[in-house]
Amino acid sequence: MKILIIGGGNMGLTYAQSFLRSHITVKEDMMILEKSTEKAKILAAKDIGTVYGTPETCIAKADLVILAVKPQDTQSLFQVIRPHVDPQQVFLSIMAGVTLNSIAQGLGIKKVIRAMPNLPAQIGKGMTALTSSDEVTRIELAMVQNLINTTGKSIYVEKESAIDAATAISGSGPAYVFYFMKAMIEAAQSMGFSTSEAELLVGQTFKGAVDLQTKSPYSCEEWIQKVASKGGTTEAALASFLKNRVHVDILEGANAALKRAVELGKNA
């Protein structure tokens, strides 16, 4: 199976490297289309496949085409590559907000898979939600999901609207975690810890807490109760969070991300 990745940015590069590292494909079957001459030179030096600068030289060779460009570039991308696509090719899009129908209509194709990965895919710890058009066969879907799973875990969702929701939760989610970690690091520093000490305290605390939650039958609420003894320090912190509407602010932030994902799709 020959794979073409359009866009050599972070996720495009992550996919190429992950597919090769897992031996699910070989570099002879890997192609990257990158319009930036500077980026193309950097990609070529990584020896992860053949790098192209124009679509007419590579699109027809691909069985699977991965669209890994910014959603704002959708219309210009469609105009450039549409003359070269084949309706039998499978297209995988990771463009936030851009719908299955927009891609199908824009390219004159039917086999479209839409996915939303996240940044931890770079280290094989990613979370991806995906859905597909009816024309994608089970074999084609399984093939693509196997590729995606080289970057972490994935879930298939029936409703396309769930992809926008996943964008707001798992797609943007790492930034929310980093935001909270940053605040805790700053709190530790204000209490007298050095930067390296604060980062170790916070980083290991997050890692340990996540491992506890994922490797046990307890819910987050149950773990909170296990940590927060009555009248203790944790209870004092949680009371402050409640007073300052931290929980509500997180919900509102996630919904703001969802709203923006939908807007990006409408503007694409």
Image (spheres, rainbow, N blue to C red):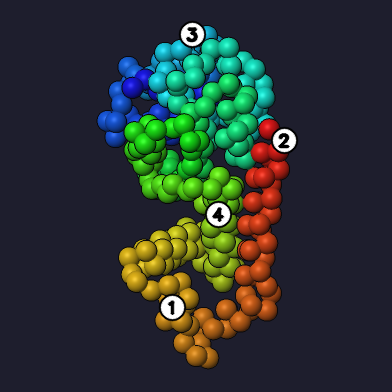
Q: Check disc 1 and report its element: helix, strand or loop.
A: helix
- Mark 3 or 2: in front is 2
**Of the residues shown, which amino acid type is indicated by label 1?**
Glu
Name which quarter of the figure residue 191 lies in.
Answer: bottom right
**Label 4 crowd bin: few (<14), some (14–19), many (20+), radius 10 Å:** some
- Mark 2 or 1: in front is 2
Residue 119 in picture, x, y percent from top left: 49, 44
Q: Check disc 2 and report its element: helix, strand or loop.
A: helix
Cα separation between marks 1 and 3: 57 Å
Dot 2 corresponds to which residue?
Answer: 267
Q: Is residue 205 visible?
A: yes
Dot 1 corresponds to which residue?
Answer: 222
**Of the residues shown, which amino acid type is indicated by label 4?**
Ile
Name which quarter of the figure residue 149 lies in.
Answer: top left
Cα separation between marks 4 and 1: 22 Å
Q: Check disc 3 and report its element: helix, strand or loop.
A: helix
Q: Earlier in the sequence, mark 2 or mark 4?
A: 4
- Please report the residue visible at 43 percent of the width from the left and 72 percent of the height from the top: 219
Describe residue 221's horizontal placement relative to residue 152 as left or right.
right
- Please report the residue visible at 63 percent of the width from the left and 63 percent of the height from the top: 250
Q: Earlier in the sequence, mark 3 or mark 2?
A: 3
Describe residue 121's horizontal placement relative to residue 139 as left or right.
right
Dot 4 corresponds to which residue?
Answer: 169
**Label 1 crowd bin: few (<14), some (14–19), many (20+), radius 10 Å:** few
**Label 2 crowd bin: few (<14), some (14–19), many (20+), radius 10 Å:** few
